[in-house]
Amino acid sequence: MAYVPSADAHAHDEPQSFVTKYIWSQDHKVIAIQYSLTAIAVGVVALVLSGLMRIQLGMPETDLVDASAYYQFMTLHGMIMVVYLLTALFLGGFGNYLIPLMVGARDMVFPYVNMLSYWFYLLSVLVLMASFFVPGGPTGAGWTLYPPQAITGGTPGAGWGILTMLVSLAIFIVAATMGGLNYVTTVLQARTRGMTLMRMPLTVWGIFIASIMALLAFPALLVAAIMMFLDATLGTSFFMPAIIAMGREMPHEGGSPLLFQHLFWFFGHPEVYIVALPAFGLVSDLISTHARKNIFGYHMMVWAIVIIGVLSFFVWAHHMYVSGMNLAFGFFFAISTLVIAVPTAIKVYNWILTLWQADIHLTVPMLFAMGFLVTFVVGGLTGLFLGNVVVDIPLADTYFVVAHFHMVMGVAPILVVFGAIYHWFPKVTGRMMNDTLGQLHFWITFLGTYAIFFPMHYLGVMGMPRRYYAYEDYAFIPQSAHDLNTFITYAALAVGVAQALFLYNMFWSAFYGRPSGGNPWRATSLEWQTPDTPPKHGNWGEKLPEVHRWAYDYNVPGVEQDFIPQTEPRPDSGPPHDRQHHAGEGRS
Amino acid sequence: MILAVVLIVIVVGSVVFHFLNPWMLTELASHWGSMDAMLHISFLITGIVFVAVTLFMAVAIIRYRHREGQRARFQPDNRKLEWWLISATTVGIVALLAPGLVVYSDFTRVPSNAMEVEVFGEQWRYSYRYPGPDGVLGYADIRHIGAGNPLGLDPTDPMAMDDVVVHDDVLRLPVDRPVRMMLRSKDVLHGFFVPQFRAKMDMVPGMVTHFWFTPTRTGRFEVLCTQHCGLAHYNMRSHVEVMEQDEFDAWLREQETFGQSLAAADNDEAPDDLVAMGRSLADSEGCLACHSVDGSRRVGPTWLNLYGSEVTLADGSTVTADEPYLRRSIQEPGAQVTAGFSPVMPAYSFDQDEMEALLAYIRSLSEDADQE
């Protein structure tokens, strides 16, 4: 148990000036807000880019974007959404805010490093945005940045664009590493008295395992970025065979484009789970709290997170079934990929079993959690198509893939992000977000994204390839498919515009929302038991909280109130419910 | 409650959509019906799970939505149920994986009687090569690429002499005969995909990749690039024509072999035939990958009737496509970009003779060329 008694007496000195409090802040809560607002801002950029792409795809006659811009928008949209929005928001935003509060710490273990992490992240975002203004514009290589194409002349932004992208990624990885070390160390070393690992909320488990994975996966991307940078600038040949690009012999020889793909996906697949595991954790807590019922099978849920985390490092080449790698690899990666479906399925079962015999409050956070479940089930099941190598062969690089990954790691996690923001916003600001706007936001977003991505699978089944700027005169594509594309564009624009509801709600409520009190959802976990809302610097006032139970004591038999905070001491001797209550601890 | 109704509508709507939508598989034209069968098995098994899970949610929401005084049942876990679910899931996974791997092992084993055909990709077109009577594709390397040899066949390899290189952008295949596609790339990653054949594979510079299939019906099919290969990725296309074996044999016999074309080039190399030299250069340098000579629109403006025409530039001004303009557009492509096209062409530096030849070739493609 990593309890530090001195932390009681030693409350931090509260920073006084505006600059130390809100700008160069070392407070995990302020850093979390900085991370979140930056991620949301850059996410809005990526959202606008996707709208522009959809206009080209659905209404090509508008001629709004040319092919160069299309590929540049496509690349930036993907990279921003996966890395600069979702990764940063889940780890830097939610991780930063919730880990210390949920484990009962006063702050991250390394507050200064935590501050640096944010400023490096901001720098990486600025460098990325700067690529819009460099000669040739940002890279249009696709977010996968596959060489040789990423650094040869036929691709937009093959000069400055790709280099700024690589530099930005390297800076981001520095930021993520500083953050990740902090999150892992804080979970392991700064838990308060009584907070055993198996009493931690699943949110902390998800972010904790995702942080470890980020520390292991991002180095693969870093070395790939450095090697490609050298190929592009110094003429090395890590990824570059002898080629003649656009009539010119390139000064390379003997490199392997497939090596890059292996490195990229060794990062890239765990990255999917770096985004998904925090979402799994957060949504578990949303469901349990708003269904007023303990999460079903807590132990299984924890182990599923751990097992998924480990297995996700052994499935990367399922992105490469038709890459030209040795076909024998397909057997191994198909098996490992489909095995991962078992712990993932357990999580889904346990979420829906939590709903059974519950007391379901369909609050806005709960609506988003339910939306996540449906979306994630569709996205997860289509993963079984693409993981099963022989089903993947016709579907690879078609719209089926686009639909699949948007469902499973685009829409599903972002629905959790929204649900989690509606849920924790009262703790962050002391005010509730507007319920009507929240409901409206949910329905447009949930139904809209389903209307976008569900039919899109079938375009892929038909064989429509992805990453196409236009589909002119392809005989196998019927007019109805073009009409569907137009419909999808309308849906996408509606969903995009609807996000303004959310932004307006968030900023308006921060100032004018209904005061929430400290625990509006009547939740058990520690962050809702802080002496102040929003929590002050040092979080816990004079004395650190003490934990006596797991985070899921909802509707415990024999107890009048329908929730028992983690800080509530257990009765010393056994009232009738106590045995069952022990079971609730998962036999710890 | 609304949510529960919506969930039910989503389930019913999705299932109905699956059966009624007009965008399912294209009509199969290869022997990979087993891939289609696997797709349908996957739809069936995952569809059942999707319906079950979503309906379960809907029922749970209807039955257990909050009412005054309601309490949830405290139930931390149920090991028996959990293990039962894990077992059922495992059975489902095996039901998907086992037949899938059986079909995949077919995909990895090329039949010994398969005919080898080469696909050569470059930004942004395909070329094809047949092995000739010896049945073996001769050695090739991009280092050998040059005038009259756009695929880089090794002129010293005897196996290459009877190879047939196709220049008209159409891959012809005999029906009902297994074919092993050997894929090469000159520059970046490309893909080779015919939706009706199902199977596809990337083309990777520096290595030869392959896959196989048996065409099962005659007809003309579109070839698509399925790996992002730069600006004109969306427009990198070609055709396959599947024909009867004897028709195919007759066609192949008429084609000039690599050896014959080498000999022809040696014999009647007329140094003053600038047009022929220019055409060969435009081919080997990749100009024709972007500039068509038949008026069709590609990444760059067509060369048909370009010479002497009025060209509208991106800034709205117009210019006559005379020799100085063409020369400048080759050496300094970003200077005067034609309206409606992206400024993506790299600068080329040709020596005096080559430039003259190219210009002569472009000139020859204009109707009024003779009047010059």
Image (spheres, coloured by chain):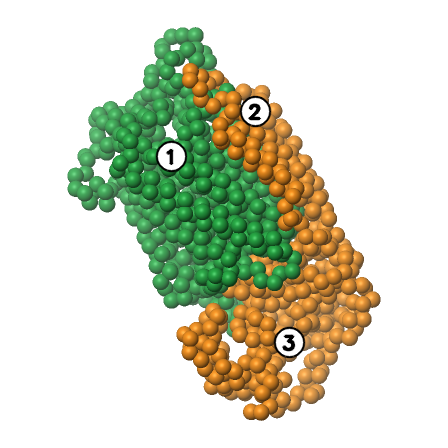
Please, what secondary structure does the residue beneath circle 1 have? Answer: helix
Identify the image quadrant of residue A163: bottom left
Query: Which disc number belongs to residue B82?
Result: 2
Badges 1 and 2: C-beta atoms under 8 Å apart?
no
Is A418 located above or below residue B190 in the figure?
A: above
- Residue B41, by quadrant, is top right
Question: Does label 3 or label 2 sit earlier along the sequence?
Answer: 2
* Front disc: 1 or 2: 1
**Is disc 1 in the same subunit as disc 3?**
no
Colour chain A appears in: green
Instruction: Say what secondary structure mark 3 lies in.
Output: loop
Q: Secondary structure at mark 2?
A: helix
**Quick one: B1 or A124, which is closer to the camera?**
B1
| Percent of width and height locating residue A558 | 41, 11
Identified at 64% across, 48% down, the residue is B22
Looking at the rendered image, the quarter that the C terminus of chain B falls into is: bottom right
What residue is drawn where x is 37% and y is 42%? Answer: A501
Q: Can see residue A295?
A: yes
Kind of residue indicated by mark 2? Glu
Residue A237 image offset from top left, x and y in percent = 49, 63
Chain coloured orange in this rendering: B
Q: To which residue does mark 3 refer?
A: B149
Quick check: A319 left or right of A226?
right
Please tell me which residue is depicted at 38% across the width and 13% down the height of the picture.
A560
The residue pinned by badge 1 equals: A436
Tag 1 and tag 3, C-beta contact below 8 Å:
no
Q: Judge by depth and name the residue closer to the eye, B105 or B296.
A: B296
Q: Which tag is nearer the camera, tag 3 or tag 2? A: 2
Residue B33 vs B159, above or below: the answer is: above
